[in-house]
Amino acid sequence: MGDSLFADASIRLENAIQHTSLSDDALERLKYPKSALKVSVPVRMDDGSLKIFPGYRVRHDDTRGPTKGGIRFHPNVSIDEVQSLAFWMTFKCAVLDLPYGGGKGGVTVNPKELSPMELERLSRGYIRGIADFIGPDRDIPAPDVYTNARIMGWMMDEFSEIQRSIQPAVITGKPLSMGGSRGRETATAMGAFHVIQTVMKRDRKEPKETTVAIQGFGNAGSILAGLLFDEGYRIVAVSDSRGAVYREEGLHIPSVRQVKNSTRELKAVYCKGSVCEAEEHETISNEELLELDVDIIVPAALENQITGENASRIKARDIYEVANGPTTSEADAILADSGKRVFPDILTNAGGVTVSYFEWVQNREGWYWTESMVNERLRDRMIEETEKVLAVAGEKEIPLRTAAYVHALRRIETATEDRGTRRYFSGR
Ligand code: GLU
């Protein structure tokens, strides 16, 4: 498989497998995606020219149910990345006991260079390309990096046009007016918040004595920063793709979010109403942010941020992975040796797909929940599964990531056994 992200992802499986009784056959199948589709998406640009964008959709494993996972629009999207993301979704859904397998999609594009109408045509074109591959009982997309509710709405509309019937359950993370769920927008951040709070309570630590640095100020990173700030944590640094702001006394996150939302600029500010004043701060790089002397770091941007190269310089004891795949397996080993705790992506960022599941249930039932119903059910599930992962790690004396994989594999193993012998004989 070569030195790829997917090969690195598979190492996690190898590490966990010795702690389970999963059969060699089942393990062998999990090392390969079930199916992968590559499409070329033609888009008529506003200037009349035609551009072709490569797109992918991968279904990794459907032993526990239809495949589930987001769609990413990013210039670095490749088949290797999409199949790694699909692989992580299989385990993430199993950790949270959602009745799904793992899938993922992506288009290689810089969405910041597209006009809103070009973006809509790209989103619709991508769905036309993958329409036969997805469906409410087959494969259910959702938002991921640089995609959002508006894009999910266009995609659901396009799929419904193709099917000649309204199909809200084909995709999650939709606008509320098209069958979206209350609480989906904040779900990834809230899920991570519950993981952090569960661990803090166990450790008997106080938020106000805890410093945090967050890499990435997108949907998950910025909302999580707000939740932690409200709880009293001292958020000393946040960053976006251009760099980070650092302030030892802590940043006033509501003001930073207000300015970022209105100007797209990340600034250390304090606002009174619409009047914002700059606060004394330092600007540092995304790499420096991860190496700050804080209690908690939260990588909430992209994969491969903590690697064999910088892992030994990480000072924070606790790393909460809100991005997918921010830590390489080489870094994992170095961090474990120096007593760091990595709360893995497949647990920490699972709040998003959990509320996606709630959305899918609501779409199929046609009965919509209140925001407090969504948030309570999310909280209960996140706390329950976090405690189970912590318990496996404690019992077996293994790192938290391996424990999360063991926990997931046990559920996949049960489903594999319950399915009977078909797969043994046909390999399907
Ligand atoms: N893209 C998100 C993730 O990586 C959400 C997936 C979903 O809601 O299906 O977990």
Image (cartoon, grey):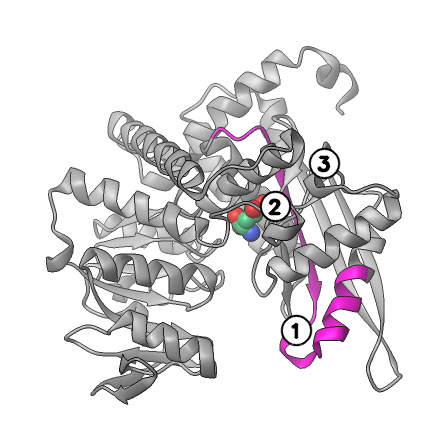
Sooner in the amino-acid sequence: mark 3 or mark 1: 1
Q: Nearest the camera: 369 or 388?
A: 369
Q: Give the range drawn in magenta.
A: 97-124
Of badges 3 and 1, nearer the viewer stands: 3
> Which residue, given by chain and number where applicable, does mark 1 sit on?
111
On screen, 27 above or below 215? above
Provide residue 13's location: percent of width, then percent of height.
50, 37
Q: Label 1 neighbourhood size at 10 Å, few (<14), some (14-19), many (20+)?
A: some
Q: Nearest the camera: 166 or 287?
A: 166
Q: What element carries label 2?
A: loop
Q: Label 2 vs label 1: CA separation?
A: 19 Å
Q: Label 3 vs label 1: CA separation?
A: 27 Å
Provide residue 418's location: percent of width, then percent of height.
61, 12
Quarter of the rendering occupied by the C terminus: top right
Provide residue 128's location: percent of width, then percent of height.
85, 54
Residue at mark 2: C-beta within 8 A of ligand 1: yes
Q: Can residue 237 be seen in this view?
A: yes
**Kind of residue at disc 3:** Pro
> Which residue, given by chain and number where applicable, does mark 3 sit on?
136
> Which residue, given by chain and number where applicable, does mark 2 sit on?
69
